[in-house]
Amino acid sequence: MKSGGLDEIVEKSEKTREIEGEIKQELPEKPRTWLAKELQFSVAAPGCEMDDLIKDFLQESRENLDHLDQDFVKLETDPNNSELLKSIPLESKRFGFEPEITIKLSKREARIFEMPIRYSGRTYTEGKKITWKDGVNALGALIKYKVSDRIYVADEHGSEILARLNRAPRFTKWMADTIRPYLGERVLEIGAGIGNLTANLVPRKEYWASDVNPHYLEKLKKMQQTRPYLQVQYTDATASETFPAESFDTVICLNVVEHLEDDVSALKNVRATLDRNGRAIILVPNGPGLYGSLDKVLGHFRRYTESQLAEACGRAGFRIEKVLKFNHIGAPGWWWNGKVLKKDTFGFWQIKLLNLLIPVVRPIDRFLPFPHLSWIMILRRDDADMGFVSVDPTEQKEAEQHHTEQNR
């Protein structure tokens, strides 16, 4: 079922109402015993006439349809529900619809309430078409959508492929462990997504998680409920007016800059929100030669060489404190899927395998004979013309030692 799936269901309920006239004409011709068996009414009850049975049956059918109509009207008219449903890709057309929508809503952490309705199902005599095959198909749907990561429609944010990458929590932890030594206590994270990295970097004295995707912001707000130090805000790296009014000692910007056509202006906005001598931590994809279909799906404008990235950071007013080559193990998979197969997402088992291998790969990643997939640059706000205070050598040595230990 595609985006018009709900409209199709509503149309079906309207068609069912049109059949009521046919049911009304047909019921009086049915024998009294058929009504007693199929409608489960007590014909022996005093004063129970045929017309009363028909009236009750039609009234109950109408109420069933009204319940369905009211439910779908509520889904379509409630702004939050409407936007949520529109952002979920629906595929099923028959009995797989119920498990599909339930599983995908659950993965999006929507609150689902079960409400009882009265329903009188058709019999096979009346044209009921469900068979054992539909039961098998429903079980197949449960398995299919359990492993599926298609919980977001394809959009400019690359939500679909990012949902698949979320199945590698060990990779996210590896990334968090790599940048943690460089973090301060007042942090702004730009492009926080659904908060996987955020959860690995908190608590902090003050932590702002931001994104431009409204669905991600809703997820981040749920994290905020149990973390009083966490603030959530829409922040577009290219629009300085969307940044928080206060300043920070650290700004995290991972997998963001490559999405922006004017990367230098975005980096200048990041610099402007930092304290004097504050740090920016950015991660961008390495190697223009690896640019392929996955980059296009994610909306990447470019992959960087070290010199290209250094030039952009310098023009934005940053001084490079440290350069880290990150994730050699991911390069073969990125090349195979994006350059050779030209796929638009990673395979489910590929991501599961990556997550499984992370504990083994982390200590030896920098020795693998593959190009690294990402650059991580630790930047300092360059205030040389205002009496820039140099980096404390002891602090830098401790950070480098921590990074080495994390990768052993």
Image (cartoon, grey):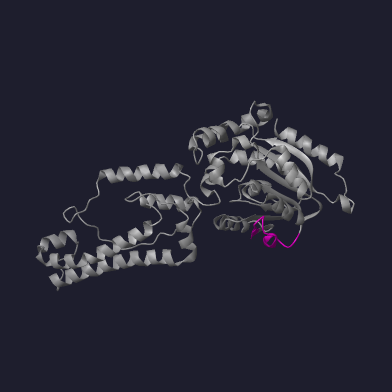
Q: Is residue 311 left or right of residue 351?
A: right
- The magenta stretch is 232-246
Q: Position of residue 391 (x, y in %)?
A: 85, 44
Q: Is residue 167 left or right of residue 260?
A: left
Q: Position of residue 44 (x, y in %)?
A: 13, 67
Q: Quadrant of residue 11?
A: bottom left
Residue occupying image coordinates x 49% and y 34%? 341
Q: Quadrant of residue 27?
A: bottom left
Foreground residue among 389 and 99: 389
Q: Residue furthest bottom?
A: 47
Residue occupying image coordinates x 65% and y 31%? 371
Residue occupying image coordinates x 15% and y 62%? 36
* 183 in relation to 40, above or below: above
Q: How many marks?
A: 0
* 304 in relation to 184, above or below: above
Q: Position of residue 191 (x, y in %)?
A: 63, 51
Is residue 21 inside the magenta stretch? Answer: no
Q: Is residue 355 left or right of residue 245?
A: left
Quadrant the C terminus occupies = top right
